[in-house]
Image (tube, helix red, strand yellow):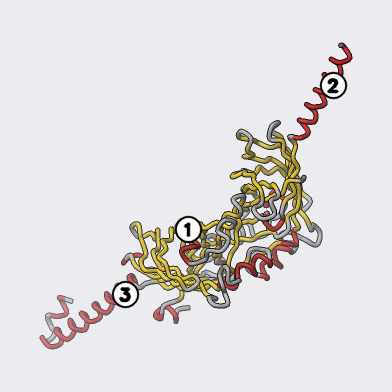
Amino acid sequence: MTRQLAAATVALALAIIAGGAAAEETYTIDPVHSQPSFEVRHMGFSSQRGSFGKATGKVILDRAAKKGSVDVTIDTTSIKTIDPRLDTHAKSEDFFNVAKYPTMTFKSTSFTFDGDRVVGIDGELTLLGVTKPVALKVSNDICGEHPINKRPMCGAEAVTTIKRSEWGMKYGIPRAVSDEVKITIPIEAYKEQ
Amino acid sequence: MKSRSRSRSRRTRSSRSFIAGVVALLALGAAAAAAAAPAVYRIEPEFTYAEFAVSHIGLSRQRGHFGRTQGTIVLDPERYSGSIDFVVDATSVDTGWNMRDEFLRSEAMFDTAHYPVIRFRSTQLVFDRQRLIGVAGDLTLRNVTRPVALKVERLECGKEPDSGRDGCGASVGTSIKRSDFGMNYALTLIGDDIDLSFEVTAFRVPSQGEAGRP
């Protein structure tokens, strides 16, 4: 009887652990549908926009435990603005210095949930060899399946505004190119099965 | 004038006042023309963004823009009038993914082989006092012309710090349904509602009287 009870307890414990593990889901970011874009002010009255074509990474989510983590690498050489001359300048030592720093990374430190939906991600952005905290505001965290390939996936949008001078990117501040950079990141990520 | 006229003949006096009158009228006319002259601005393509955003499979908002735009803006705030003619090269669609851009240029979407140009022409500018707040006009896309109301969210004018050129920057937005323009492909995957946002920079074209100034 005692043995049976012990076995049942172990089984229950295992089930709980299994259940806990099952609540943790891993998602792989779909790079072409997750291109971070940015906007800066230029010369007082106009704005300039651009984006990075290559962002890769994984999101681990445990909605029941309200925990998560994200690790994203952005290829700085994939920067694209409206004009190839601006792209060349953006890649130079004045801005992203892609020859020396071909990637920037974002690693989360904590997730904020509203119910079981992600509404915020705090983390650290490493850019130009400098690591500083960044808080992302997340909206429209929705999951479903891809209508064509039927794979389960989630989507969302993250926004933040940073001061690039904090990472030592100071060229053209304040008038030619603003210090404030508004960042918008669409996210689509496939669930690993 | 009064003290001088006493010693002058009647003829000289009337001739003088006639000239003075003409000069005054001309000066007034010129001043009025200068004040009321509509300012003409040419859009600077390198600093002008025509962006669209659309829901993708109900999970995310995807963005793209057109790399080549051109246009002319005429503003006459004192008369609450003006006009906007904005042309977008549909072939310059850019979403950061070549395969997707090819798809967007195809017959199913923008059909740029047949309709290489998207055009907006204003019918009426809307002012709040002398501030431009909206633009009503016609959008032509895939050879379908529909009325569209643009909201002017920001309009700042001044001199560009480096060049000293007179310019304006504006943020303008609206939403359309692509199905209104016959773009019906894959409406279940790619949303029908398209948010359009324009970041426009335009520089003033000197009027003829100003052209000779240094």
Dot 2: element: helix
Q: Earlier in the sequence, mark 1 or mark 3?
A: 3
Question: Which residue does the numbered mark 1 point to in the structure image?
Answer: B175
Residue under mark 1: which chain is it in?
B
User: In the current view of this chain or complex, which residue is farthest to the left?
Assistant: B10
Q: How many marks?
A: 3
| CA–CA distance in space, label 3 to label 2 | 93 Å
Q: Could you tell me which residue is drawn at 63 percent across and 63 percent down?
A: B95
Of labels 1 and 3, the one closer to you = 1
Q: Camera-side residue: B99 or B82?
A: B99
Q: Camera-side residue: B180 or A81?
A: B180
Tag 2: residue type? Val
Question: Which residue does the numbered mark 3 point to in the structure image?
Answer: B33
Question: Which residue does the numbered mark 2 point to in the structure image?
Answer: A10
Q: Could you tell me which residue is drawn at 36 percent across and 68 percent down?
A: B123
| CA–CA distance in space, label 2 to label 1 | 59 Å
Tag 3: residue type? Ala
